[in-house]
Image: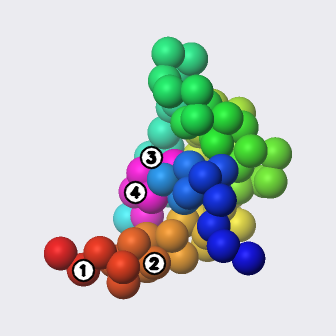
């Protein structure tokens, strides 16, 4: 199954998280691009982030974000 735009949008949110600390989250404001707002809500619905507008990564979200960061590094090594 190929990636669709919704999955790409979710990956783009996950790679914004700083994996070096659990004390730093993100906030997706209501003035953000609609696809970012929707992606963050889907991540919340999937149990990967603590709030509909971002917040902190859950344990599952941290694992997913690590994988997203790894994939980004492999595909874009520069």
Residue furthest left in the image: 78
Which dot marks residue 71?
2
Mark 2 or mark 4, which is nearer to you? 2
Of marks 4 and 3, which one's residue comes earlier in the chain? Answer: 4
In the image, the segment drawn in magenta is 13-19
User: Going 58% across and 35% down the picture, which residue do you hit?
Assistant: 35
Query: Secondary structure beneath disc 2?
Result: helix
Query: Secondary structure beneath disc 4?
Result: loop
Of marks 3 and 1, which one's residue comes earlier in the chain? Answer: 3
Q: Nearer the viewer, residue 53 or 57?
A: 53
Residue 30 falls left or right of residue 48: left
Q: Position of residue 21 (x, y in %)?
A: 42, 59
- The answer to whether mark 4 and mark 3 are in CB contact below 8 A is yes
Establish if 16 lies above or below 21: above
Mark 2 or mark 3, which is nearer to you? 2
Question: Can residue 57 be spotted in the picture?
Answer: no
Which dot marks residue 66?
none
Q: Which residue is mark 1?
A: 77
Residue 14 forms part of the magenta stretch: yes
* Label 4 – label 3 distance at C-alpha: 7 Å
Question: Can residue 58 be spotted in the picture?
Answer: yes
Q: Which residue is mark 4?
A: 18
Q: Nearer the viewer, residue 78 or 44?
A: 78
Of marks 2 and 3, which one's residue comes earlier in the chain? Answer: 3
Query: Secondary structure beneath disc 1?
Result: loop
User: Going 58% across and 27% down the picture, which residue do you hit?
Assistant: 34
Q: Residues within 10 Å of mark 1 (few under 14, many from 20)?
A: few
Q: Which residue is mark 3?
A: 24
């Amino acid at each position: 199954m190929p990636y669709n735009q919704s999955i790409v949008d979710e990956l783009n949110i996950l790679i914004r998280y700083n994996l070096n600390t659990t004390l730093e989250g993100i906030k997706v404001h209501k003035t953000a691009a609609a696809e970012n707002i929707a992606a963050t809500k889907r991540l919340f619905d999937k149990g990967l982030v603590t709030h509909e507008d971002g917040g902190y990564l859950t344990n599952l979200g941290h694992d997913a974000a690590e994988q997203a960061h790894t994939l980004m590094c492999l595909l874009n090594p520069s």
